[in-house]
Image: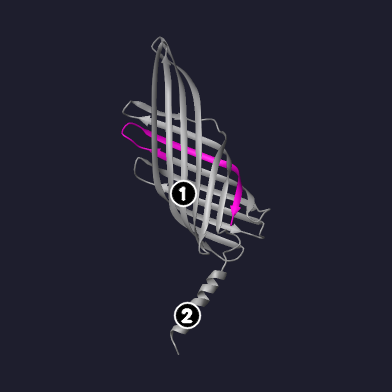
Amino acid sequence: MNPIRPCAVLLLTFVATSAQAEPSPAIDRIGLSLGGYYADADIRLSASSERYGLGRASIEPKSGNETLGRARLEFLIGDHQGLEFDYFSFRHSRSQALQRSFDIGDARFDVGAQLRSRFDLDFGSAAYRWWFGDGPSVFGLGVGAAYYRVKVGVSAEVSADDTRVRVGERYDADAVAPLLTFGWRYAPSDRWRFYADGSGVKKNGGKLNGHAWNAAAGVEWFPFTHLGVGLEYAVTRIRLERDSSRYDADLDLHLHGPAAYARLRF
């Protein structure tokens, strides 16, 4: 008997089985989500400088709702592994007036300041995820990398009696850090899907370090085969620290609120 024949039969059987294999109905071979994140934003910026003899100053803008654009792209490699990309940006600016008085001996001094702050954050991630399960419910774990870039500008006009001084600082820094992700998907039918996602990143060392985590839970509805809509509630927390010879700065950003997406799947 020719030994090549059974090997060829096994190979053809494997190819045919692979061609017929399908991923879980809870995940898509290609999925693209585009939408907005209507978040309640809590922001705290603080800075200190020993070089300039300044203590720590904080700017805490009043909490309010911000609309953030967000995009996600997912595609499978095989039936149980895939790549995922996520990106969002946050922009915020504010002016804040300060007025203080203090006494030295019998003299009283009035000091006023007009602070202006501008804060930009870009956050993106890429992860390789493994999906476990073949039925309507699957669970995924992933590893990857996150990229974040921070731009902060603070300017102030300080007046003491008849004297006015203008000062300002700004910085632009970015960093890449390892990322861990997890996810859950459940599809009771072809039109409905429930999901939960989470991710966390931590970076130590360098001029820009800190941690960030994100969690979201939502539902998707597909009135059409390849087009649907998604609604979710998401929570994002980002804590960053910048160290330099001139000054140190801290950022604490907390976002939470609903999000809506248009979802394309193939």
Quarter holding the C terminus? bottom right
Labelled pair 2, 1 in contact (Cβ < 8 Å): no
Residue 58 on the magenta span: no
Quarter holding the N terminus? bottom left
Report which residue position mark 1 lands on: 125
Q: Please give left or right for residue 40 compared with residue 124 in the image.
A: right
Instruction: Classify residue 250 by image quadrant.
Output: top left
Please tell me whether mark 2 or mark 1 is closer to you in this view. Answer: 2
Report which residue position mark 2 lands on: 8
The secondary structure type at the circle numbered 1 is strand
Name which of mark 2 and mark 1 comes first in the sequence.
2
Is the magenta region chiefly helix, strand or loop?
strand
- Which residue lies most toward the right here? 223
Amino acid type, label 1: Ser
Residue range corresponding to the magenta coloring? 240-266
* Image x and y of residue 134, in percent: 57, 66
**What residue is shown at x 63% (from left), y 59% (from top)?**
187
* Image x and y of residue 212, in percent: 46, 45
**What residue is shown at x 51% (from left), y 30% (from top)?**
61
